[in-house]
Amino acid sequence: GAYLADWVSYEIRPDIEFKDNHLTIDYSRFSKLGSNPDPDWVAKQMAVIERQVEAAPAPAIATNKSSQDSFMAPGAPTAENPAAPAGQSAPAVPETVRENAVVAATVTLG
Protein backbone atom coordinates (compact mmCIF):
# COMPACT_ATOMS: atom_id res chain seq x y z
CA GLY A 1 0.00 0.00 0.00
CA ALA A 2 0.25 3.63 -0.50
CA TYR A 3 -0.39 4.35 3.18
CA LEU A 4 3.33 4.41 4.03
CA ALA A 5 6.01 6.77 2.78
CA ASP A 6 8.65 5.61 0.32
CA TRP A 7 11.32 5.50 3.06
CA VAL A 8 9.79 2.27 4.34
CA SER A 9 11.12 -0.37 2.00
CA TYR A 10 8.83 -3.07 0.66
CA GLU A 11 10.62 -5.74 2.73
CA ILE A 12 9.67 -4.18 6.08
CA ARG A 13 6.30 -2.67 5.23
CA PRO A 14 3.63 -4.05 7.59
CA ASP A 15 0.43 -5.59 6.29
CA ILE A 16 -2.32 -4.43 8.68
CA GLU A 17 -5.68 -6.18 8.34
CA PHE A 18 -8.92 -5.87 10.31
CA LYS A 19 -10.35 -9.23 11.40
CA ASP A 20 -13.60 -9.58 13.38
CA ASN A 21 -12.84 -7.24 16.30
CA HIS A 22 -9.03 -7.01 16.20
CA LEU A 23 -6.09 -6.21 13.92
CA THR A 24 -3.41 -8.48 12.54
CA ILE A 25 -0.01 -6.99 11.72
CA ASP A 26 2.17 -9.14 9.49
CA TYR A 27 5.54 -8.48 7.92
CA SER A 28 7.14 -10.03 4.87
CA ARG A 29 8.77 -13.40 5.39
CA PHE A 30 12.04 -11.81 4.24
CA SER A 31 11.74 -8.80 6.56
CA LYS A 32 14.98 -7.21 7.75
CA LEU A 33 13.32 -6.80 11.17
CA GLY A 34 13.87 -10.45 12.11
CA SER A 35 11.56 -13.27 13.14
CA ASN A 36 9.65 -11.28 15.82
CA PRO A 37 9.42 -7.74 14.44
CA ASP A 38 8.43 -4.98 16.86
CA PRO A 39 9.64 -1.72 15.30
CA ASP A 40 9.40 1.46 17.38
CA TRP A 41 7.61 3.25 14.51
CA VAL A 42 4.54 0.98 14.89
CA ALA A 43 2.67 1.66 18.15
CA LYS A 44 0.20 -1.07 19.09
CA GLN A 45 -2.67 -0.88 21.55
CA MET A 46 -3.41 -4.30 23.05
CA ALA A 47 -6.61 -5.52 24.75
CA VAL A 48 -8.25 -8.80 25.70
CA ILE A 49 -10.85 -9.78 23.09
CA GLU A 50 -13.33 -12.62 22.69
CA ARG A 51 -13.71 -14.35 19.36
CA GLN A 52 -15.53 -17.41 18.05
CA VAL A 53 -13.54 -20.33 16.62
CA GLU A 54 -14.96 -23.44 15.04
CA ALA A 55 -14.27 -26.49 17.20
CA ALA A 56 -13.69 -29.65 15.19
CA PRO A 57 -15.92 -32.56 16.20
CA ALA A 58 -14.01 -35.31 17.97
CA PRO A 59 -13.89 -38.58 16.04
CA ALA A 60 -15.55 -41.57 17.65
CA ILE A 61 -13.01 -44.24 18.55
CA ALA A 62 -14.11 -47.73 19.53
CA THR A 63 -12.34 -48.89 22.67
CA ASN A 64 -14.15 -52.15 23.39
CA LYS A 65 -11.92 -54.41 21.24
CA SER A 66 -8.18 -54.76 21.07
CA SER A 67 -6.52 -53.80 17.81
CA GLN A 68 -3.73 -56.37 18.25
CA ASP A 69 -5.49 -58.86 15.98
CA SER A 70 -6.39 -56.30 13.31
CA PHE A 71 -4.45 -54.55 10.57
CA MET A 72 -6.96 -51.66 10.58
CA ALA A 73 -6.21 -48.33 12.23
CA PRO A 74 -7.85 -47.68 15.62
CA GLY A 75 -11.26 -46.09 15.11
CA ALA A 76 -11.54 -47.22 11.47
CA PRO A 77 -15.09 -48.15 10.39
CA THR A 78 -15.91 -51.85 10.71
CA ALA A 79 -19.03 -53.99 10.31
CA GLU A 80 -19.70 -53.66 14.06
CA ASN A 81 -18.94 -49.92 14.10
CA PRO A 82 -19.76 -48.42 10.66
CA ALA A 83 -18.81 -44.89 9.67
CA ALA A 84 -21.45 -42.17 9.90
CA PRO A 85 -23.05 -41.35 6.54
CA ALA A 86 -21.53 -38.35 4.77
CA GLY A 87 -23.15 -35.07 5.71
CA GLN A 88 -24.78 -36.47 8.87
CA SER A 89 -22.00 -35.83 11.36
CA ALA A 90 -22.71 -33.52 14.27
CA PRO A 91 -21.98 -29.89 13.35
CA ALA A 92 -19.03 -28.22 15.03
CA VAL A 93 -20.06 -25.97 17.89
CA PRO A 94 -18.32 -22.57 17.91
CA GLU A 95 -16.07 -22.04 20.91
CA THR A 96 -15.41 -18.66 22.54
CA VAL A 97 -11.71 -17.89 22.99
CA ARG A 98 -10.30 -14.98 25.02
CA GLU A 99 -6.91 -13.68 23.91
CA ASN A 100 -4.71 -10.61 23.99
CA ALA A 101 -4.79 -8.95 20.55
CA VAL A 102 -4.00 -5.68 18.79
CA VAL A 103 -7.06 -3.40 18.72
CA ALA A 104 -5.37 -0.23 17.38
CA ALA A 105 -2.11 0.54 15.59
CA THR A 106 -0.38 3.81 14.72
CA VAL A 107 2.38 4.00 12.10
CA THR A 108 4.67 7.00 12.70
CA LEU A 109 6.47 8.32 9.62
CA GLY A 110 9.66 10.34 9.75
Image: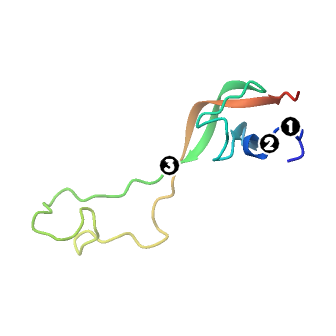
* Residue shown at the point (51%, 58%) measured from the top left: 91
Q: Give the structural element (helix, strand or loop) at label 2.
A: loop
Q: How many other residues sit within 10 Å of disc 2, few (<14), some (14-19) or many (≥20)?
A: few
Disc 1 vs disc 3: which is toward the camera?
1
Q: Is residue 83 left or right of residue 68?
A: right
- Residue 25 figure quarter: top right
Give the mark, 3 or 2, whose residue is nearer the N terminus.
Answer: 2
Q: How many other residues sit within 10 Å of disc 3, few (<14), some (14-19) or many (≥20)?
A: few
* Residue at mark 1 to residue at mark 3: CA–CA distance: 43 Å
Q: How many other residues sit within 10 Å of disc 1, few (<14), some (14-19) or many (≥20)?
A: few
* Residue shown at the point (15%, 63%) measured from the top left: 67
The amino acid at mark 3 is Ala
Q: Which mark is residue 7?
A: 1
* Residue at mark 1 to residue at mark 2: CA–CA distance: 6 Å
* Residue shown at the point (73%, 45%) measured from the top left: 11
Q: Is residue 86 left or right of residue 98?
A: left
Give the mark, 1 or 3, whose residue is nearer the N terminus.
Answer: 1
Q: Give the structural element (helix, strand or loop) at label 3.
A: loop
Disc 3 vs disc 2: which is toward the camera?
2
Q: Which residue is mark 3?
A: 55
Query: Where is residue 29 shown, x and y percent of the image?
Result: 63, 47
- Residue 4 figure quarter: top right
Query: Where is residue 68 shown, x and y percent of the image?
Result: 11, 63
* Residue at mark 3 to residue at mark 2: CA–CA distance: 39 Å
Residue lying at the far left in this picture: please name it.
Answer: 69
Eyeballing the image, is 70 above or below 10?
Answer: below
The amino acid at mark 2 is Ser
Q: Which residue is mark 2?
A: 9
Could you tell me how many numbered marks the image carries? 3
Eyeballing the image, is 93 above or below 108?
Answer: below
Q: Are marks 1 and 2 in contact (CB under 8 Å)?
A: yes
Q: Is residue 40 left or right of residue 92?
A: right
